[in-house]
Image: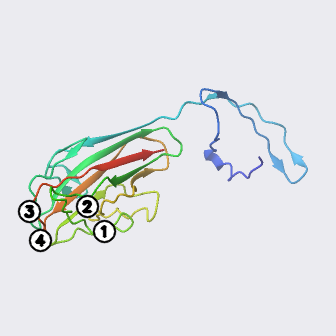
Amino acid sequence: DYLTYSQWGSGSGTTIYGLKTSTTYKAKVKAFAGKFSESAWGPVSAAASTISTSISFSVGGVASGTTIANAITDVSTTPVGVSFGEVSFDTPVEAAQSLVVNTNANSGYTILVSQVDNLKNDLDIIFPAISGTNSTPIAWPANIGAYGYHTTDSSLGTGTSGRFTNSNTFAQFTSTPLEVAYSATPVTNETTYILYSIQAGHNTPSGNYSQTITYTMYG
């Protein structure tokens, strides 16, 4: 197709989509001016071979005493678990996990988070969630029970991209998968941290609370 210089990406070139993997391609171009003038074909480009798209994603634990988003984690975590221990009134307990991505996909990747169920105790009493949402996170509240998360990705791909730029912005977990990490380009060992925060309020029932959180990635 005939496109302008800027439409072809100017000096940065362009990306050709829809190619088969493990196949060698060559390209050549010609210029077009007006309706009846065009140049001869230019030289054939050097051969270029396609490769299969690869993507990998891992969750990592974070040690206590680690600074994440201006907070110092109070407890250590593993890739598969977060244990807050005893939670006191109006004193946030904070923990974190890392999300690490490698991909050569031209379109990058997106990571979503969702909860399988609410944070509940043995009597099915739900721990109060922070009122902030993924689309509109809020500052951590005082004097009430609250539970939520913050992502260190300050440039997401949906909604207001920089909504978590301020380190004091938290959202509640929901059953709907929502974005917590994003890149529009290939990445190598790109790491995003999820900071979990919880505190008890005056009327927060005692008990052992638990829930399951799911991270989903696509590229």
Q: Residue at x 39, y 58 (%)?
A: 176
> Going from the N terminus, do you reach mark 2 or mark 1 first?
1
Q: Name the residue beneath numbered marker 2.
A: 148
Q: Which kind of residue does numbered mark 4 sit on?
A: Asn
| Distance in Å between CA atoms under marks 1 and 3 | 21 Å
Image location (x, y in percent) of residue 102: 41, 38
Q: Which kind of residue does numbered mark 3 sit on?
A: Ser
- Label 3 packing within 10 angstroms: few (<14), some (14-19), many (20+): some
Determine whether, in the image, residue 142 is placed left or right of residue 102: left
Assign a secondary structure to mark 1.
Answer: loop
Q: Which kind of residue does numbered mark 1 sit on?
A: Gly
| Distance in Å between CA atoms under marks 4 and 2 | 18 Å
> Going from the N terminus, do you reach mark 4 or mark 2 first?
2
| Distance in Å between CA atoms under marks 2 and 1 | 8 Å
Q: Which mark is residue 88?
A: 3
Against 52, residue 133 (above or below) is below
Q: Which kind of residue does numbered mark 2 sit on?
A: Gly
Q: Nearer the viewer, residue 121 or 183?
A: 121
- Label 2 packing within 10 angstroms: few (<14), some (14-19), many (20+): many
Q: Name the residue beneath numbered marker 1.
A: 132
